[in-house]
Amino acid sequence: MAKVKSALTDNMEKCFVCGNIYAECHHVLFGSFQKKYCTKYKLYLPLCGYHHRGNEGPHMNYEKNLEYKRMAQKYYEEKIGSREQFMSEFGKNYL
């Protein structure tokens, strides 16, 4: 997965949480229209299967999901645009 670049981490080759080398690309903001903008701004995190789809992953754990979404929104507001622009593109404010 090294060819995928992320705005949120420099290392897409290891799980963001545990360092496992078998990582999957997690679109931090997912859903039909959100995924398009997530891809545009490279809002990805590398997560191993457990930290992606398991009980502690964003698809099963609301708090972890919110943590990653907040991380992405903070990056967006610091580097890309305003909160209003984020809300216009992603449909929600996570901060």
Image (tube, rainbow, N blue to C red):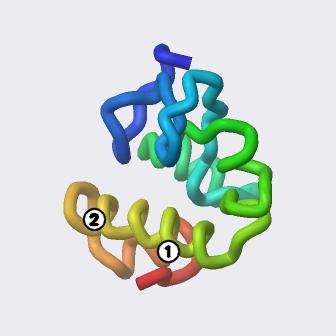
Can residue 44 be seen here? no
Which amino acid type is marked by label 2?
Gly
Picture residue at 41% right of the left edge, 84% below the top: 95
Relative to residue 84, is residue 38 drawn left or right?
Answer: right
Q: Nearer the viewer, residue 66 or 37?
A: 66
Q: Pointer 1: what residue?
A: 88
Picture residue at 53% right of the left edge, 36% below the top: 15
Residue 95 vertical position relative to residue 72 in the rendered view, above or below: below
Identify the image quadrant of residue 72: bottom left
- Mark 1 crowd level (few <14, some 14–19, many ≥20, 10 Å Cα): few
Identify the image quadrant of residue 71: bottom left
Q: Nearer the viewer, residue 88 or 55?
A: 55
Quarter of the figure that contains the N terminus: top right
Q: Pointer 2: what residue?
A: 81
Relative to residue 79, is residue 54 drawn left or right?
Answer: right
Q: How many marks?
A: 2
Alpha carbons under labels 1 and 2: distance apart: 11 Å
Q: Residue 69 at what x, y percent from top left?
A: 51, 67
Question: Which residue extends farthest left?
Answer: 78
* Disc 2, SS: loop
Q: Nearer the viewer, residue 40 or 30?
A: 30
Identify the image quadrant of residue 49: top right
Picture residue at 37% right of the left edge, 80% below the top: 84
Which amino acid type is marked by label 1?
Ser
Can residue 85 be seen here? yes
Q: Residue 93 at what x, y percent from top left?
A: 48, 83
Relative to residue 4, is residue 60 drawn left or right?
Answer: right
